[in-house]
Amino acid sequence: MAPIGGGPQGLDVPVAPVRRRRMPSGAPIALSLAVVALVAGAVLFVSGYTLGRQQGTTPGTGDSLQQAFEPFWDAYHKIDREYVGDVDQKALVEGAIGGMFEALGDPYSSYMTSEEYKNSLSGISGQFEGIGAEMTSRDDAGETGCSPAGDGCHLVVVRALPDSPAEKAGLEADDEVLAVDAQSVIGQTLDETVNKVRGKRGTPVTLTLSRDDAAPFDVRIVRDVIETEDVTSRVIGGGEVGYIQIQGFSSSAAGDFKDQLRELVEAQDIDKLVLDLRDDPGGFVDAARTIASQFVSSGPIFWEEYADGKKKEFTAEADGIATDLEIEVVVLVNGGTASASEIVAGALQDTDRGTVVGETTFGKGTIQQWQTLSNDTGGFRLSIAKWLTPDQTWIHEKGIEPDVSVTVPEDLAEGEDPVLDRAVGLLTDGTTAGD
């Protein structure tokens, strides 16, 4: 999914490509331009990312690779010396780099231009310039993750963020985006469309939309700075249960989570908690570690396994707010629970610290390193590690199976939430995961 100018790829927060699995219509992706700087070297997890340092040198072709690269250089020099048209050297280099990443066949590894690279990092910053809507790609059967847009694959709005330019302009859930500034989205990927909708505060963008069976219509929206609210909380279950929802692991999510958890546990003396990670596409790995550490007092939160087979353990941080085993925890998940949110769910499940309720998670088990290239040639994200649960289970393309499975019907009435109802029942009725 992708965000429309502002956050998740609802056009506000960029997320990695999704595997085709049915996801609820509320699963977000945002579209927007980040307006805060990220520290190089920080670990991200919008489906698992790390930031790499820019390389200062251009390595030559080693002796062992001379034969393999000979066809490449033959083709390059032929174009450079004899092509009858104008040769854009920068475009040739960018095309060659992009081709290498496409050849990997990994949807989570890709080359990006400078603008695309900057925009793609925006979704985990917590602040964006855009229109403040969430969007996904969906096929005729309702499965998300199709690409590119065209016959049988549609780019649709999931929701407009509260008080955003998109909401004020009247965007609604299930609006199909047909064109951006009069340019059709046919043949475009979700990310490509998101990049077109993103833009600087104060600049306009016109979306051509289709709603229900009515004729297509245009909506002009002026972009603005969008502040995302990744963490929300309240008391439910007749005052007995604390509910905290995380919609993304942005740079500010861990701090906000700790503040709201402390209010529930310490100020209001709540000892029954629901942690809602449904439709959370991920974010910073460090945020996931910090949040899981509020419940798990010691031992591994997750592992990383690298190309050489070596593994590194990431243990729980000290002084968690809700590590007391008298505090009961239920974690809600579904097919939109991915990456950093799966790290948290996996940590609480493997350590028996929480009961996982809902549907099988997305299954994103790799970490990407983000790295800029020299000479304003853009950057890339490359899968450089697997992440494993505390029990060293790799959930990639499998997902995390809930302890208590709750199937959500497609014709669910507005306001109904059988997954949350089951979670509250487990906490207030004294039932267990095996019931």
Image: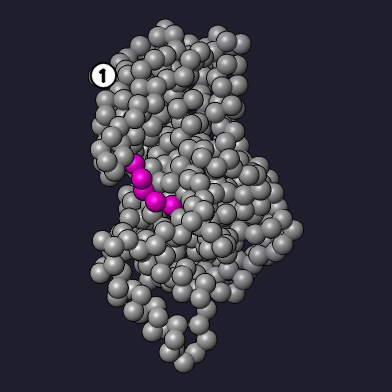
Quadrant that contains the C terminus: top left
Residue 113, position as x, y percentages in the image: 52, 63
Picture coordinates of residue 71, whole percent (x, y): 29, 75
- Tell which residue pokes out farthest to the right in this image: 202
Residue sitting nearer the eye, 299 or 204: 299
Q: Which residue is mark 1?
A: 435
Q: Kindly indicate the quadrant of the structure image that contains residue 259.
A: top right
Q: How is the image coloured?
A: one colour
Between residue 237 and residue 245, name the one nearer to us.
245
Q: Amino acid at mark 1?
A: Asp
Q: Please report the bounds of the magenta region as a residue range.
A: 381-385
Report the residue that reaches farthest toward the front: 63
Q: Is residue 321 above or below residue 281?
A: above
Residue 380 in the magenta stretch? The answer is no
Q: Is residue 215 visible?
A: no
Q: Residue at x 48, y 56 (%)?
A: 57
Q: Which type of secondary structure does the marked residue at label 1 adopt?
A: loop
Establish if 231 lies above or below 338: above
Q: Residue at x 54, y 49 (%)?
A: 121
**Near-viewer residue (224 or 264):** 224
In the visual, does 91 lie left or right of 22? right
- Is residue 184 placed above or below 78 in the rendered structure? above
Q: How far across and down, in percent of the image, does residue 224 sit?
A: 70, 53
For the point 25% across and 32% down, the residue is: 393
Q: Position of residue 410 (x, y in %)?
A: 36, 46
Q: Is 383 one of the magenta-colored residues? A: yes
Q: Quadrant of residue 430?
A: top left
| Residues packed near mark 1 inside 10 Å, few (<14), some (14 to 19) or many (20 plus) | few
- Residue at 39% across, 51% down: 382
Main SS, magenta region, reads: strand
In this orientation, which residue lies closer to the viewer: 65 or 244?
Answer: 65
